[in-house]
Amino acid sequence: MAKIAVSPIPTFATVEQVIEELNPGYPVYCLRPAEIQRQAQYFLENFPGRVLYAVKCNPHLAVLRILYDAGIRHFDTASLTEIADVREHFPQADCYFMHPVKARAAIQTAHSVYGVGHYVIDHVKELEKIVESTGSADGRVILVRIVTPAHDVQYQLSDKFGIPADQAPELLRQVHEAEFQTGVAFHVGSQCRSPQAFADGVRTALEVIQKAAVPVHYLDVGGGFPAPYEKDHPPPLEDYFSAIHEAFDQDILRRDCVLMCEPGRAMVASGCSLLVQIQLRKGNKLYINDGIYQSLSETLLGKIKFPARLINPQRNLSTTSQDFKILGPTCDTVDILPEPFNLPDDADEGDWIEIGQAGAYTNAAATRFNGFFPETFVSVDAPPLLPAT
Ligand SMILES: *Cc1c(COP(=O)(O)O)cnc(C)c1O
């Protein structure tokens, strides 16, 4: 099959070169393809099972292309748009429909147009919807998403989705009786700082499987693997992988069961920085061209602290620093970052700030509120901007 041509994004050696050539008054996402590739390969080589990428975290086509080229072939998708984006550009890739609540038309189209074979549910009504929309099971897989106890996470996801573990065996039996292959899935919550949370999730899932007493073909430990941020240094990924492996390995059920994970954040956070410009300085306040309604909602919703550095290739920056309050471009008073950036104390209008670890939930969550919508992507050969250790 012919490869679909995608216009490549412009490549620069460094972020300074981006500034010199574009002089951007608009935000610019600076991708680090080598870093994204490295993270993807780390998961593929070290996670003891199948690796899916959670598309919602950063659905930009350039990011999907880098991941695909690095060997990712399985994609966790939550909507028909995400499924179409993946399947139209990467016909060899598999999409998994991991949103527990789906429109009937989306189920039907995912099945008949895109051949989606894996679906997640957390309620019997959703099983009925899938059966009514797609007919016989025909080798397809339905995973039951269960609630797991939350600890040490930035976002708790079990408030919204998941069936309590004591009700899950019955739903698993119903899936089995409808002749689907079965699976159990959980999501410990995003930016999870505890490898133990995954081990507990695996144990809860194995208990559910034992009680259900039907064959179970998949165990999906979800996403939630953390990325390092400013003053937030979670354990290395290998600790998570070995905790999962240990919990999974204790049980003989593993022999018939494929282990899966669905990382978003840990796969792509470090692979992109965000270049913003200061539009006005008022005392210790800096007004910039990106904010809460665009790339930086996680500073508020997830209390994420991004590393930041001031850049202006045209002048020498002060060697002493101070905290600045950062204000976004929209007219809304919510549009103020909750934590200051520490920058050289002569920061001023026209200087740029590079914000690191900005590959996850930035462009993915941006709105067009007030007409500010960052959409410029470049690729940079330089190493990522990491948080201070
Ligand atoms: C958001 C989400 C993910 C990815 O979560 P991260 O914390 O970014 O790893 C994976 N699976 C599901 C079902 C999700 O909703």
Image (spheres, rainbow, N blue to C red):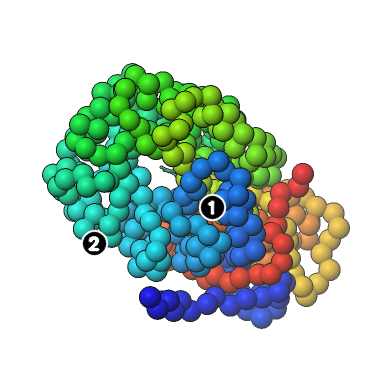
Where disc 1 sits, the SS reads loop
Which residue lies under the disc numbered 2? Answer: 113
Q: Amino acid at mark 1?
A: Ala
Residue under the point 48% across and 79% down: 7
Residue under the point 30% across and 33% down: 122
Residue under the point 37% across and 36% down: 217
Q: Position of residue 170 (x, y in %)?
A: 26, 23
Along the viewing direction, whichever of 312 and 115 lies nearer the viewer: 115
Along the viewing direction, whichever of 255 and 144 lies nearer the viewer: 255
Indicate if the residue with disc 1 has its beta carbon within 8 Å of ligand 1.
Answer: yes
Which dot, 1 or 2, sits closer to the camera?
2
How many discs mark residues in the rendered view?
2
Q: Amino acid at mark 2?
A: Val
Whole-number angstrom distance, CA of label 1 to CA of label 2: 29 Å
- Residue 162 in the figure: left or right of residue 194: left
Is residue 77 visible in the rendered structure shown here? yes
The numbered mark, 1 or 2, whose residue comes first in the sequence reads 2
The answer to which quarter of the image holds residue 235 is top right
Q: Position of residue 330 (x, y in %)?
A: 48, 58
Where disc 2 sits, the SS reads loop
Q: Quadrant of the C terminus?
A: top right
Q: Quadrant of the N terminus?
A: bottom left
Indicate if the residue with disc 2 has its beta carbon within 8 Å of ligand 1.
Answer: no
Which residue lies under the disc numbered 1? Answer: 360
Question: How would you rate the neighbour count of disc 2 (Cα within 10 Å): few for under 14, some for 14-19, many for 20 or more?
Answer: few
Q: Position of residue 216 (x, y in %)?
A: 35, 32
Q: Is residue 358 above or below residue 303?
A: below
